[in-house]
Image (cartoon, helix red, strand yellow):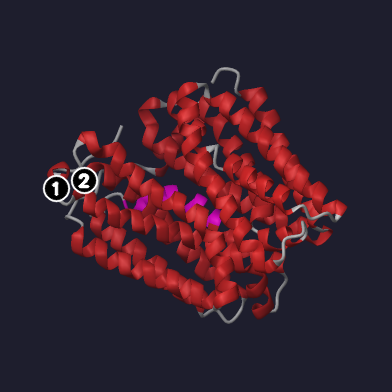
Amino acid sequence: MVSTYPGAATEPRGLTSTLVLGLGTFAVGTDAFVVAGFLPDMATELHVTTAAAGQSVTVFAVAYAVLAPIVATLTARLPRRTLLVGALLLLGLANLGSALSPGLPVLIVTRVLAAGGAAAFTPTAGAVSAALVRPELRARALAVVIGGLTIATALGVPLGDLASHWTSWRMALGLVAALCLLVAGGVFAIMPALPGGPRVRLRERLAVLRHPGVLAVLPLTVLGMGASYTVYAYSVPALHAVGIPESASVLLLFLYGLGAVLGNFGSGYATDRWTPVRVLTVGYAGMTVALGLLGWIAAAGASPGFAVGALVLLWGATTWTQSAPQQHRLIAAAPREAPLVVALNASAIYLGIGAGTALGGLVLTLGAPALYGMSAAVAALALVYLLLTGKTS
């Protein structure tokens, strides 16, 4: 069920506007993931540990998860163009503040502000993109917007790692800020004026959480993303521990991104062909194996580059295999609240990212083998949870 706006579907520039929104979701996704690529350099310059700097990823993710339903409630009546432009301006200014941060406390505050802008932009962009085009083009429009996030997932950390070698983390965040401000201008210039919608109380929005099917599915998203991000937020030092020099880590991170894209699109086809639970079972089993073997390599001190590359590709693919089948299960559980449960799943994704990053920061001091081992253990826990709760899906 997709909300529409009067006259929006006849807008001749609908697909053009959708492309601009897709660029916006790319900026949001890059902002969310780029920090992990230069955590060591950020930690050094801010005179904190890598684990402490990693909390900037945690607070962004958790703030997004918490703020998304609140922001949606508070901004429901705002005209859509005003909301989208305002969200991008906030995101851009917050990233500029992060780039200029003199210390970790200021950085943390600006990451929370950035999360607020992201939480306002992404769900709105999805709804507006579907409403701007004719019904037969809606799936294509949604694919463009979601594609911005998928590409950012694949490129965010590698771009951050490249920035650490070629320039600085401050410059990287400054470029993200510039991109957000540029897209804000594009949205203002191209987007038609669309009204807001009726205000729905937060309690009514969250009432769907009492649905047994929804309540059973969402924790799995948190566990699955937490399993991957226990290591992924600290991927640069973690890859170094399995024999990958820092100068070559960007290539492995691109392999992870390639796996993420293949897993994301492949899982959609596989979910339609088989059942969501079967796809998820294969995904969590594969993630457990990939992370467990990387931990074994780190402990053994071996450095078989080809094997590490294959395992990183598998790790990326299995991490992002989750999205399509989990959304499928949620929509099947609550079809009348489909847009809401998909938004809640996005919050669960970011909550998992935040929890995994926090857990990784705690385990990081024990060494890379423990870091990989903890990730593999959480992935195995996700698999067990799925087997216990997914019999009817």
Q: Residue at x 26, y 68 (%)?
A: 185
Q: Can residue 205 be seen in this view?
A: yes
Identified by mark 2, the residue type is Leu
The residue to which callout 2 is attached is: 132
Q: State the mark number for residue 11.
A: 1
In depth, the one of 78 and 258 nearer the eye is 258
User: Does 72 appear in magenta?
Assistant: yes
The image shows residue 328 at horizontal and vertical percentages of 46, 29
Q: Is residue 327 visible?
A: no
Kind of element beneath mark 1:
loop
Task: Look at the image and give the residue range highlighted in magenta.
Answer: 61-75
Kind of element beneath mark 2:
loop
Where on the picture, by quarter, is residue 246?
A: bottom right
Say which quadrant the C terminus sits in: top right
The image shows residue 264 at horizontal and vertical percentages of 49, 40
In depth, the one of 175 and 108 nearer the eye is 175
Q: Distance between the residues labelled 2 and 1?
A: 6 Å
In depth, the one of 132 and 307 nearer the eye is 307
- For the stretch drawn in magenta, the main secondary structure is helix
